[in-house]
């Protein structure tokens, strides 16, 4: 009975086909997409935690009343704070009942009689020549921490429920495809290479993979 050496097994093993390379490329693309979608998920989760715990959120600017400090089309990171934390010069976003929020710079701050937690503030846009017509009474408001010009349209797009639905479906499909159990067929060439004869490693009780290597 002849014994086939490990060198002969390696030589007789079938060569990798182009299909294997194509599958590897597809797998790499899927992995990259999964990492990107996972990164977006992590960012979304972090934003939700920051908003809930520390009061951070994002304000989009459609007008240029705060130009040149914050031009139209900018996005600003704001933080919700009590009225007593604001001083003259702060850029503040104030909610107005029945109207859109307004973001201007505080020009004066004063107490409100009968309510120690409230403040009366006047504000003006950096591009305006006069204060806003009426003062604002606030118990809390949003302080502008930082702003980035030209990204408001991008954040508006992220709000589109159709985009969020598409990303969710894509992530689910990719995850299902990536982790779906598959069987790897045994190569007929490798099975026939030994003709049913045990390799030296098998006869000594050693792993065959070590002999083939």
Image (cartoon, rainbow, N blue to C red):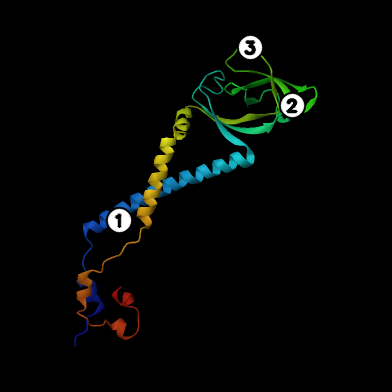
Q: Are marks 2 and 3 in contact (CB under 8 Å)?
A: no
Q: Which mark sits nearer the N-terminus, 1 or 2?
A: 1
The answer to which of 21 and 38 lies nearer the viewer is 38
Please identify the quarter of the rendering in which residue 198 is found: bottom left
Q: Which class describes the residues within 10 Å of circle 3: few (<14), some (14-19), or many (20+)?
A: few
Q: Residues within 10 Å of mark 1 (few under 14, many from 20)?
A: few
Q: Which residue is mark 1?
A: 24
Looking at the picture, how far across and down is residue 208, in whole percent? 31, 77
Q: Which residue is mark 3?
A: 130
Q: CA distance from mark 1 to mark 3?
A: 65 Å
- Residue 70 x/y as whole percent: 55, 23
Q: Which mark is residue 143?
A: none
Label 2 sits on a secondary structure element that is strand
Residue extending farthest right: 114
Residue at point 62%, 33% (across, down): 79
- What's the distance in space between the residues labelled 2 and 3, CA to CA? 24 Å
């Amino acid at each position: 009975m002849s014994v086939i050496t490990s060198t002969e097994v390696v030589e007789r093993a079938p060569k990798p086909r182009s299909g294997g390379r194509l599958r590897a490329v597809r797998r790499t693309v899927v992995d990259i997409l999964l990492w990107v979608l996972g990164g977006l998920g992590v960012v979304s989760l972090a934003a939700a935690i920051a908003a809930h715990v520390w009061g951070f959120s994002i304000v989009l600017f459609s007008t240029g009343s705060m130009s040149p400090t914050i031009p139209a089309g900018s996005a600003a990171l704001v933080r919700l704070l009590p009225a007593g934390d604001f001083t003259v010069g702060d850029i503040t976003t104030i909610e107005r009942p029945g109207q859109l929020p307004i973001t201007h710079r505080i020009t004066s701050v004063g107490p409100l009689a009968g309510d120690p937690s409230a403040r009366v503030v006047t504000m003006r846009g950096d591009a305006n020549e006069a204060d806003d017509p009426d003062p604002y009474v606030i118990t809390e408001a949003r302080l502008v921490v930082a702003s980035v010009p030209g990204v408001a349209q991008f954040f508006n797009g992220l709000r589109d429920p159709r985009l969020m639905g598409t990303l969710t479906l894509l992530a689910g499909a990719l995850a299902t495809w990536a982790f779906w159990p598959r069987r790897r067929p045994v190569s007929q060439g490798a099975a026939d290479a030994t003709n049913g004869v045990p390799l030296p490693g098998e006869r000594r009780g050693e792993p065959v993979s070590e002999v083939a290597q």
